[in-house]
Image (cartoon, rainbow, N blue to C red):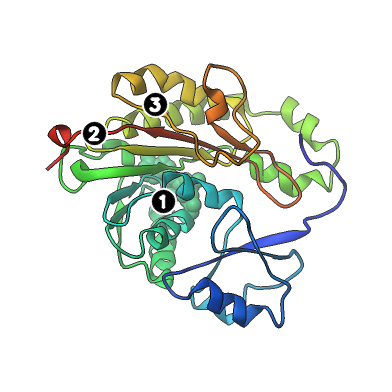
Amino acid sequence: ATGNTNTGPQVRYVRVNTLKISVDKALGLLKDTIEVALDDIVPGLFAIPAHTELHAHPLVSDGSLILQGKSSCIPALALAPETDWVVLDACAAPGNKTIQLAALMNGKGLILACELNEKRIKRLQDTVKLAGASNVKVMHQDFLTLDVNKSPLSQVKAILLDPSCSGSGTVHRRLDHLLPSFASQETGGVDKPRLEKLAKFQKKALQFALSFPAVERVVYSTCSVHQQENEDVVSSVLEFAKSNGFQLGYPLPQWQQRGLPIFDGAEKLLRVEPSQDMDGFFVALFERRLGSAVKAD
Ligand code: SAM
């Protein structure tokens, strides 16, 4: 399902940053000049006509509105952190999901936003500052080398792992309407060595996320359409996850498109097929309950 219809996007999405403005107030300020529809799945997400130019809008410039695609809002929703938790955003820049988590936590608790790439750190810091996300601490580090037994990492209850990926879900959507045969050409022309390298990193990172001592919820997400970066990555860590007490959660049960049926339980995974209005995306949720005896101090 590539969504080839030879037309461009009909809508674009903009998320209300509730750290700065309420949904009602934002709606009130926009609705006289822009046709706004509230999304029925992501709270505080507005669908507006695709041609609307918002980059210079004062509510965007001051961080009240965030230009963020609908599918990219799903991972943080699936993680559903409690407001007083310590949360780790493992691969955070440019920070759209970091600040969405900050808003879901009402600016409370603590979000550790980890990013390896020095150039992208500045972008992450700017995003956090503009959003008024005062519960975020930016860490310039390699996620894979974090000391999980050291506070506050030892207290992390939820991890969002949105690692580097091929971005094929985004490319599909942008090019589909221009080039109807793109999907098949692309499938034939996959850069296999790059995909293998990415998948290797993704598996390692996901397994590492599942090894944090106090973590109860881990979301793994990509904007890729490739099974190799999605279901295969999840499948490769399932045994390890089970041995650590995790099972697959079932995020957004109302969402129809689910994981490719390559193992029992893959229907719990969530897929967004690329379409005119949405990037392709993949989301997996691992969850476990820890008794107080095993909680980190
Ligand atoms: N979650 C981000 C958002 O929604 O704005 C997008 C994350 S992007 C897909 C992946 C990020 O992971 C990149 O900024 C990349 O530099 C970073 N990254 C890659 N390897 C990493 C590592 N080992 N540790 C921390 N960050 C890493």
Crowding near the residue tagged with mark 1, few <14, some 14–19, many ≥20 C-alpha atoms within 10 Å: many
Q: Which residue is mark 3?
A: 247
Q: What label does residue 274 carry, if any?
A: none
Q: Which amino acid type is shown beneath numbered disc 1?
A: Ala
Of the residues under marks 2 and 3, which one precedes in the sequence?
Answer: 3
Crowding near the residue tagged with mark 3, few <14, some 14–19, many ≥20 C-alpha atoms within 10 Å: some
Name the foreground residue: 72 vs 23. 23
- Label pair 1/2, CB-CB below 8 angstroms: no
Mark in front: 3 vs 1: 3
Name the foreground residue: 107 vs 169. 107
Q: Which amino acid type is shown beneath numbered disc 2?
A: Leu
Image location (x, y in percent) of residue 242: 35, 20
In this picture, residue 89 sits left or right of residue 251: left
Q: Is residue 200 visible?
A: yes
Image location (x, y in percent) of residue 13: 64, 61
Q: Secondary structure at mark 1?
A: loop
Image location (x, y in percent) of residue 22: 49, 74
Q: Which residue is mark 2?
A: 290
- Report if the beta carbon of the residue with label 1 is closer than 8 angstroms to ligand 1: yes
Q: Is residue 104 above or below residue 89?
A: below
Residue in the picture at 78% in, 58% down:
10
Q: Which residue is mark 1?
A: 92
Residue in the picture at 65% in, 73% down:
54
Q: Which amino acid type is shown beneath numbered disc 3?
A: Gln
